Image: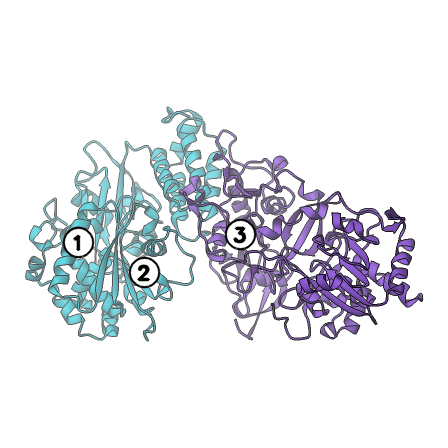
Amino acid sequence: MGYPHKPHPKETLVLSKHFGEADARTYKGWVKRGGYEMLAHALTMEPARIIDSVKESGLRGRGGAGFPTGLKWSFMPKEKKKPHYLCVNADESEPGTFKDREIMRWTPHALLEGAAIAAHAIQAEVVYLYIRGEFTEPWAIMEKALAEATAAGVFGAIKLYLHRGAGAYICGEETALMNSIEGKRGNPRIKPPFPAAAGVFGMPTTINNVETLAAVPLILKKGPAWYKGLSLASPKSTGTKLFSVCGHVQRPGNYEVTMGFPLKDLLYELCGGVPPGRTLKACIPGGSSVPILNREETESCLLDYEGVVEKGSMLGSGGVIVFDDSTDMVYQIMRLARFYAHESCAQCTQCREGTAWTTKILERILSGQGKTADLDLLLDLAENMTGKTICVLSDSCAAPVVSGIKKFKQEFEDYIAGRRKPLLVA
Amino acid sequence: MGDELLNLTIDGVRVSVPKGTLVIEAAKQAGVLVPHYCYHPGLPVAGLCRMCLVEIEKAPKLQIACATQAAEGMVVRTQSPQAKSGRMGVLELLLINHPLDCPICDQAGECELQDFTFQEGRPATRYSPHYAKRFNPVEDFGPDVLYVPNRCILCTRCVRFMEDVAKEPVLNVSERGDRAYIGIHSEGRLDHPWAGNVVDLCPVGSLLSKDFLHKARAWELDKTASICTGCSQGCNVTLDTRENVIVRVRPRSNLEVNRFFICDHGRMNYRWMNRGDRIEAPLVRRGGELHATDWDEALDFVASRMRGAGGRAVALVSPRVSTEALFFARELFRGLEWSGAFQVVMGEEAPLAGVPNLALRAERAPNASGAELLGYSREYAAAVATAETAAVVLVLDEPDIAVRTAGALIYVGTVLPERARDAQAVLPIANVAEEEGTYVNRDGRVQRYFQAKSAPGMARPAWWVFSELVTALSGGPGGHVGTAAEAFDRLAASVEAFRGLSYAQLGFGGAPTPVATVVPA
């Protein structure tokens, strides 16, 4: 993406083209860059035509699940009998992910324009932008941008509201986010009903990620065929994707590449590789909730929805966490489990108790008190925590545990056998 | 819901259910109880304990039976290895933070966590004894409710009851993850008139009744179907008896009357059933004093006084006695110039907001409608005035007898009020827990109650006492009534309002009277 680094020649600057340009944050500056042209045009279009374009472009949700955006919009009732809502998920709280934050910081109007177009496409009169509570700077920028654009009257009849989260990871889950907007505890809801039938305030609702919506004006501007053409590997994954790279690389940050870009090139060329004298050990390619890849898998992985699945993980939110050979994988996995144990909403038994128990077992292994049977127990617990709960927080805790034990078993065994010095005090 | 029936197979049993039925309810029809905690038919579905995991053919993963609607051709397996292992996993997780203090827990013996763990849980935990269990101190939630957070499995039935049924949301889930517990509003108390239901709803021993605390073990209790005497609503209840003492009243589900709930007034209204100062033998006046005697002499004594009485008779009855007793008391005066009346204690009405037509009624009498249907009037003061000059005055279990009479006063009751010592005869009767009978609630529904304990001494059901007197007065054998069933059927045969009803058909759920609904005064 460039900022704060210079753009790398291998990047494809679409969403991040104007990152680093302070002027782009203002309404005037955005209009100068061609902003809000497509919104004005879209508001004259049949909603169904917009949905068709987005369907044709192959755009898929950038929040983690990768659901086709146009298809999601088409689930909204065609004949409008109740108020429709659009929720924008700007609760970006997945550890290792910080791309939406940059979109809001540098190109707030791209998000607002995309959101307004989407609202028109799904016949929503109200848009709620749910912004993560810790995002103080993006919040201030979004507030200003919204005030300016609203004053300029670009949104027509569509009303946009910012809603600030209070710092719960689970409020990034779509139905928990809706409960939170309603002023309730941020608990995920059982589905069905799906949001398109009964979402926020029980009304038909669509919820999209920031990065997804920011791409929408460009798709309308340059045409779905252009967007669809941005694909290096699988034709099912199109466009560009912002990857937030953190951990043991020399140049961490956000990088925008075309779908299907090799993960190896992203890490070694764009990010400058691991620190000198170190070697790559592992990588989490899509935010903390996805399975860990080992070095071999990482270096042969193509960054699109299909490519990462092929390696046994998921593209997720595009939060790439890199570990070099100095990393204690047992500790890293324990830290992730501890995070999920802290953030579990406490509804489902498997998640409430399972995340905490998993953390305790991992802590015990790290304190040198582990038993050989603990590894099987962890895997069995993970099995119980996968695919059995309301939302996927529990699955997210299980994923790194299972992949970690599978791929780095030796490290666990070293702690258990006493070959490694305990890291924690029991 | 509609008339459309769906056919599905549950554990090999084919059942047909109306559209909209949940799999967990459909399974009951197949004779299968899917283990569950958060689900309760009287509460909105939460789908969060994940205990009712079942396998449904063609579904990619296990589904929860409580939030899945039955569909045509659906094939459900509750006992497949995957489903059992899924539920076993939930049970193990529920137990890691649950203390194994069953020996001192009031819920033991009627605990759903105990039952389902016994049924399909792991024989031993894999949770290391070195890990501390979650600990939070016991909290005082309200006048009758204690919260023991350590036993809580966060099923949120209590939260949903207060929020969606009582509509007084004072409870919530506080904190997150395994630190979560049920919180109470910082300025609130669990003192809603129906709050006690959270104790019944709690599937474990986390919400406890202070009234029942450490009073009995569940397996020592005999359970008897009864009707609450607290007001004219006629809530169906279960009387829990331990060694001839009523120790607890709990709701018994009746979708037509009280669904799954009773109010706290009714719940606490049982101590009088255990009163010790009861009349244990019939008393007759001889030489200016009351003397204990046997039933033969007592019945002869009363019959002879009545036979000789020419003139007016007045019956002052309690609206808390059985319909059968009220019927035979009336029969007693057949042929005489007769008037009967009752008075009703009034209180404050307390509705349960989330359930239509369910309230603690202002009229605190279980059988006022029955008395009215049998011709007793509410003109109590007038009847008391008439009694002054009446030849015979019968008082039926009305402790508040402000009656003066020149005639013969017959007192039939459970206890002996001071004023009743002037009576010519005192006949001891059983109270509601000691006999069988029926009440008619405010909506005209006839409901049976059953005998929970034995009556003290020689006390007999009031319907027996009056039917024997009727037999004695009519002067021949063959009229004896031996059971409450016979008593009711006699009543149904001769009183238009009850025509066509039979005691057997009333069963445990009751039935509406055939005549138009009684309009409450």
Residue visible at 31% across and 58% down in the picture = A66
Residue visible at 31% across and 53% down in the picture = A64
User: Which amino acid type corresponds to the residue marked 2 in the rendered image?
Assistant: Phe
Q: Which chain is cyan?
A: A
Q: CA distance from mark 3 to mark 2?
A: 49 Å
Scheme of colours in the image: by chain
Q: Does B67 appear above or below B209?
A: below
Residue B469, horizontal then vertical, whole percent:
86, 62
For the C terminus of chain A, give its image quadrant.
top left
User: Which amino acid type corresponds to the residue marked 1 in the rendered image?
Assistant: Glu
Q: Residues within 10 Å of mark 2 (few under 14, many from 20)?
A: some
Which of discs 3 and 2 lies nearer the camera? The answer is 3
Q: Is residue B190 visible?
A: yes
Report the front residue among B230 and A329.
B230
Q: Does B223 appear above or below B338?
A: above
Residue B241, horizontal then vertical, whole percent:
71, 46
- Residue on which disc 1 sits: A143
Q: Does A354 appear above or below B469?
A: above
User: Which amino acid type corresponds to the residue marked 3 in the rendered image?
Assistant: Pro
Identify the chain of the residue marked 3, using the numbered disc in the image. Answer: B
Q: Residues within 10 Å of mark 1 (few under 14, many from 20)?
A: some
- Residue on which disc 3 sits: B193
Q: Which chain is purple?
A: B
Q: CA distance from mark 1 to mark 3?
A: 47 Å
- The answer to whether B48 appears left or right of A289 in the picture is right
- Residue on which disc 2 sits: A67
Which of discs 1 and 3 lies nearer the camera? The answer is 3
Rendered image quadrant of residue A362: top left
